[in-house]
Image (cartoon, helix red, strand yellow):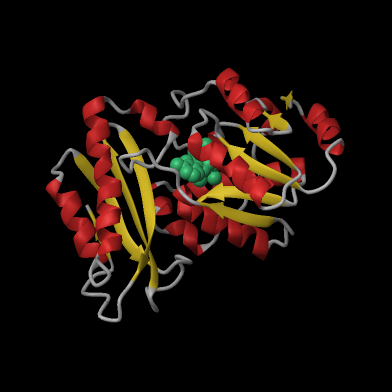
Amino acid sequence: MTVVTDRASLATARAALTGTVALVPTMGALHEGHLSLVRSAKAAGADHVIVSIFVNPLQFAPGEDFETYPRDLDADVTALRSEGVSLVFAPTREVMYPHRVRVTVSPGPVAGILEGASRPGFFDGVLTVVTKLFHLTTPDIAVFGEKDYQQLTLIRQLVTDLDFGIDIVGAPTVRDADGLAKSSRNAYLSTPQRELALTLSRALHAGAADTVDPLGAASTVISDAGDAVELDYLELTSPDLGEPVAGDQARLLVAATVGSTRLIDNIAVTLSPEFTAHSSPRVHS
Ligand code: AMP
């Protein structure tokens, strides 16, 4: 496994990779969820997997956790080596953004809802860095987690609408045994906060189990947790996030803050014919 931090070394190492190449973009502090993406890349036919590790300043707003975001390159490299990754690209900010940022990618309407409503500019930052990583690593396949479902949706739109010619693979969310979605930000949680954080996955599973009123079932679990789980949004949408719910497939998405840690999660929901969109398709705090 080769680890590179600058563009020239990346170009040389990339040129040496033959066959089908997959990219797995990450911000590091790797956990089982990230490692599952490497396995998904191989299952999708990759001969070589490139993992990028870069905490992208463009997707953090002032006051968010850019400075404190967990970083542990040595542990990440060790984990990736044991997964059989071919190449790790871990650039500095100066390598990724050698100039003042002028041109960015405009993500379109799906970026204005859910995460985008709470974090303006977030998806411009995500799609811009992913575009740069695609150009720098020229993959055939790129793998993203369903954990960040809106991000996955927007990346599919990016490669389709702007003709990137890269196959996007979505990988299922990896959870701890008690249901909590694995996240680098879980490291911020104290033991009692971690218990409260379980409210999100419990709410989603309650929602998925109620095919008539998933939003009501999920909402009850969140309300029962009290004020310590500060709800940002709980929404039931179409699987492509673009249309009101129609047909029997939907996605239930939640964001909430516990302590000072903002957590997101989502789940697929199959609706029964008795489902009606009720009075409101979304619950906000
Ligand atoms: P991040 O390092 O948080 O930017 O995440 C990098 C990639 O890993 C993204 O495609 C995420 O959706 C994915 N990811 C993060 N957490 C999980 C998880 N628990 N299960 C599966 N994929 C995940």
Residue at figure coordinates x 16%, y 56% from the top left? 220
**Is residue 71 in view from this perspective?**
yes
In the displayed structure, does residue 217 sit left or right of residue 208?
left
Q: Which of 241 and 239 is in front in this view?
A: 239
Q: Where is residue 240 in the image (x, y as percent from the top left)?
A: 48, 66
Point out the image quarter for the N terminus. top right
Instruction: Tell me: residue 238, above or below residue 139.
Output: below
What is the quadrant of residue 4 in the picture?
top right
The residue sitting at the bottom extreme is 273
What is the quadrant of residue 14 in the picture?
top right
Q: Nearer the viewer, residue 15 or 160?
A: 15
Q: How many labels does the image show?
A: 0
Residue at figure coordinates x 56%, y 20% from the top left? 75
Q: Where is residue 114 in the image (x, y as percent from the top left)?
A: 38, 55
In the displayed structure, does residue 190 sit left or right of residue 73?
left
The residue sitting at the top extreme is 74
Q: Where is residue 148 in the image (x, y as percent from the top left)?
A: 47, 49
Residue at figure coordinates x 66%, y 59% from the top left? 159
Q: Nearer the viewer, residue 78 or 237?
A: 78
In the displayed structure, does residue 224 sit left or right of residue 69?
left
What is the quadrant of residue 270 in the picture?
bottom left
Q: Position of residue 272 (x, y in %)?
A: 30, 76
In the displayed structure, does residue 52 sit left or right of residue 264?
right
Residue at figure coordinates x 32%, y 73% from the top left? 271
Instruction: Tell me: residue 72, above or below residue 35.
Output: above
**Is residue 103 in view from this perspective?**
no
